[in-house]
């Protein structure tokens, strides 16, 4: 199993930082970025290799590759997303389809979270699960969150931002454990998803899998502090959280 980070996004709501940097390289604690935090988490749980999907301002990630490898003791492979500024992240995850077949812990490049999330996902393995989503069942939800409805026996039934928050079991936080045997099926679902509409999210690919009868499981992360950084308010929260980890 290896780590996988989606770091191709432009993050236009974080300008001026993202005039020259992808969102994953915006500083959250001194010189520490979201990407730094994620790589540190991966290293702490024993991963030795990480693939990073890059696109917007990818040259900034390439420039830091060697330093990040040395700092975290990881072998990094960069995967180019040629449509990062045109299409949404269903295509971005599909670009990593070859590494999905190795089994991955996937982390969005804009999610500040503690290593306890990765540990929770790894601890949840062993009962035949193929895909396990990290789920926040504590947070009060609103319209923008990626909401999930879970059935105790059947797993994920629905995953979308477009649902009544009151009906949701929790929020998907942007971290997933994907076993190797799920890689090909997920890649096919992602391809179906972006071919239908390139503006769709990879979570829509998860929904495509569910619609096909594939069981996706969840693991509650407990009452932990995390944030998805989309704008400057989120960045301020991320900086408050990052210094605690």
Image: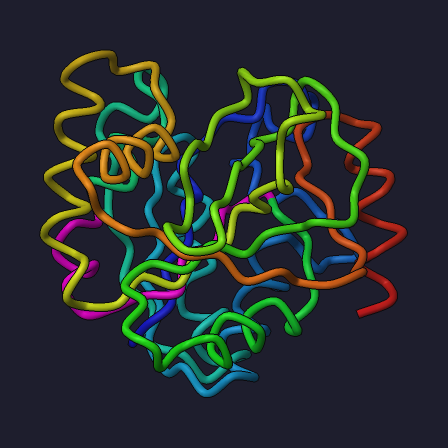
Return the x and y of residue 116 as percentages of the image width and height.
66, 73
Check residue 4 for magenta coloring.
no
Residue at x 50%, y 81% (from the top left corner): 123
State whether residue 196 is above or below residue 16.
above
Vertical side of 35 occupied by 202: above or below: above
Tell me the quarter of the image containing the N terminus. Answer: bottom left
**In this picture, is 99 found above or below 84?**
below
Q: Nearer the viewer, residue 12 or 164?
A: 164
Is residue 71 found left or right of 28 in the rendered image? left
Magenta stretch in the rendered image: 96-110
Q: Residue at x 28, y 33 (%)?
A: 205
Percent coordinates x, y for residue 134 in the rendering: 54, 56
Place of residue 166 in the rendered image (x, y in percent of width and height, measured from the top left): 71, 25
Residue 213, x across and y down, in percent: 20, 42
- The residue located at (86%, 63%) in the rendering is 243
Occupied quadrant, residue 117: bottom right
């Amino acid at each position: 199993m290896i780590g996988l980070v989606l770091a191709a996004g432009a993050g236009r709501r974080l300008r001026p930082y993202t005039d020259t940097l992808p969102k994953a390289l915006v500083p959250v604690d001194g010189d520490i970025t979201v990407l730094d935090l994620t790589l540190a988490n991966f290293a702490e749980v024993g991963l030795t290799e990480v693939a990073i999907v890059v696109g917007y301002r990818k040259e900034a990630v390439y420039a830091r590759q060697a330093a990040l490898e040395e700092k975290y003791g990881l072998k990094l492979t960069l995967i180019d997303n040629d449509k990062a500024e045109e299409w949404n992240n269903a295509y971005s995850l599909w670009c990593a389809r070859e590494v999905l077949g190795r089994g991955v812990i996937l982390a969005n490049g804009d999610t500040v979270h503690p290593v306890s999330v990765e540990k929770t996902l790894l601890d949840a393995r062993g009962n035949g699960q193929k895909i396990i989503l990290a789920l926040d069942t504590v947070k009060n939800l609103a319209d923008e969150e990626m909401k999930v409805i879970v059935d105790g026996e059947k797993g994920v039934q629905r995953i979308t931002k477009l649902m009544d928050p009151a009906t949701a079991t929790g929020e998907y936080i942007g971290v997933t454990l994907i076993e190797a045997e799920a890689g090909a099926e997920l890649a096919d679902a992602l391809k179906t998803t972006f071919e239908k509409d390139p503006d769709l999210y990879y979570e829509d690919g998860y929904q495509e899998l569910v619609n096909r009868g594939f069981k996706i499981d969840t693991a509650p992360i407990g009452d932990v502090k995390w944030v998805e950084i989309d704008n400057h308010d989120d960045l301020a929260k991320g900086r408050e959280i990052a210094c605690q980890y």
